[in-house]
Image: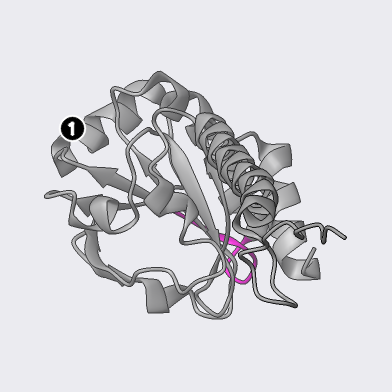
Amino acid sequence: MMIEEKPKNDAPPGKLSPTLLLFLIVPLVGIVVAFVMILGDTAASNRAQLPDNLNPQSASLINFAAPNFELFDINGRVVTLDDYRGRVLLLNFWQTTCAPCIKELPDFADFAADQGATGAAVLAVNFDETTQMVSDFFVEHEISGIHVAFDPNSAVRNSYGVMGIPVTFIIDGEGVVRDMHLGALSYSLMEQYVAQVMTGT
């Protein structure tokens, strides 16, 4: 009587064979690789949605304390961020050679006048230009009523990560950046941004 020899099984009882493990691991590795690729594509897509002239550093300021500053205004008086505590501040960066900046300045002047001394405030930070250049510019374009501060070495501009202009940071009464707008602002948009900060929406 012949006894049939049972096939050998290298795997100890209760353990998976190497071949079976291979069949299980390969699909799992494939899933992980696909997931990583999807995440990479999503991140690249999100980066692609940012305007070329928007520094991610600027966007990263939202919901964080605005960088403090100490500048001089057109009359030689010191201006700091703390001067605007308790008021919503539209902190605008601009230059006289920027066409969209020129377009929005009259709206800023009207908005500031309507807000008065206790409503939302506007501070237009001019960088790398002289007080004489700005004074001549305002006379030429018949603009008045805007509080202008000067950032001659772009130190404040750099602390806010400003690349493209005009750009406006909407800062609440506690000194926290709540939003930002790249490009010219209209009067109605200024109202909307301030209302959003005031209502917390």
Q: Give the residue displayed 52% in from the left and 31% down from the top.
A: 104
Residue pictured at 30% horizontal, 33% vertical = 95
Characterize the local packing of mark 1: few (<14), some (14-19) or many (20 or more) Cα atoms within 10 angstroms: few
Point out residue 170 in the picture as x, y percentages from the top left corner.
56, 57
Above or below: residue 121 compared with residue 176: above
- Determine the residue positioned at 32% across, 22% down: 140
Q: Disc 1 designates what residue? A: 133
The amino acid type found where label 1 is placed reads Met
Q: Residue at x 52, y 29 (%)?
A: 48
Q: Is residue 156 visible?
A: yes
- Outermost front residue: 1
Question: Looking at the picture, does residue 173 appear above or below residue 98?
Answer: below
Q: Which residues are magenta?
A: 116-123
| Callout 1: SS | helix
Residue 106 horizontal/vertical position (percent): 53, 33
How did the renderer colour the structure?
A: one colour
- Give the quarter of the figure containing the C terminus: bottom right
Residue 105 point in image, percent of width and height: 48, 34
From this view, report whether residue 138 is shown above or below residue 148: above
- Asked if residue 117 lies in the magenta stretch, the reply is yes
- The quadrant of the image that shows the N terminus is bottom right
Looking at the image, which is closer to me, 121 or 47? 47
Give the camera-side residue of 169 and 89. Answer: 169
